[in-house]
Image: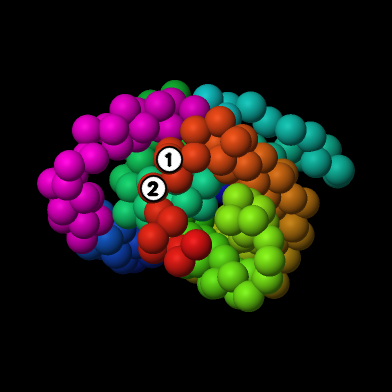
Amino acid sequence: MHLPDGLLDPITIVVLWIITIVFMIFGYFKMNNLFKNAESDRLIPYIGVLAAVIFAFQFVNYPIPGGTSGHLVGGTLVAVILGPWASLIVLFLILVVQSLFGDGGITVLGVNAFNMGIIGGIFGFYIVVLFVRLLNHTSLKKEIKVTLSTAIGAYISIVLAALICGIEISLNGIISIQVAVPAMVFWHLFIGIGEAVISALIVYYIYKAKPDFITTEAIMGV
């Protein structure tokens, strides 16, 4: 899902850069308000550690049937731990560093951040919120509710991001939408399983080891 330079048409790149910048500015002010509370000091190291973990995980590929491979995106995972706006900012910073290593283009940073940070992070988080509130009607423990919801949110958001990515690719007029979208979505139906399992396991582990790391329980309505 790390799109390279030269694949998309300029209009798509510019429009998604604008959308991403607007979301990041709004996210910056939301994060700034969060840092004003008494517990803000503990969030700063969390952000750095999570960014490093996601950066490392994105370099670890696991095999997918058909000769391809996938890796963790982590947008929904970061959003569940630190909040949706932190997710976008963290993913953008990771993508900047990765682009310097040739993993994803520099001119399409806004596009990749849109796909992985806004769709994979912000949208994925609110899918998690929806399923947590549905599971609130059950007798499941909160860590199970959040873990299951994270898995579902991570899976849906990664497949949706792949769908949108396929549409973006087709807008260049070189690859038809009938080819780009099925190709992206099909493989991410498998890649999404890895995303869901890894994200859920990390959230469950955090609940068992250090539950106060999950800072979004009030937003999720747990």
Q: Amino acid at mark 2?
A: Thr
- Tell me what residue is drawn at x 74 percent, y 33 percent: 62
Q: Is residue 32 left or right of residue 217?
A: left
- Tell me what residue is drawn at x 40 percent, y 54 percent: 216
Judge by depth and name the residue closer to the eye, 166 or 50.
50
Residue 120 visible at all: yes
Across and down, in percent, residue 46 comes to: 36, 32
Residue 158 visible at all: no
Q: Is residue 108 left or right of residue 153?
A: left
Q: Which residue is mark 2?
A: 215
> Is residue 68 found inside the magenta-colored segment of the image?
no
Evaluate if marks 2 and 1 touch, with contact meaning CB atoms under 8 Å apart: yes
- Residue at far front of view: 139
Residue 95 found in image quarter: top left
> Is residue 42 found inside the magenta-colored segment of the image?
yes
* Residue extent of the magenta highlight: 25-53
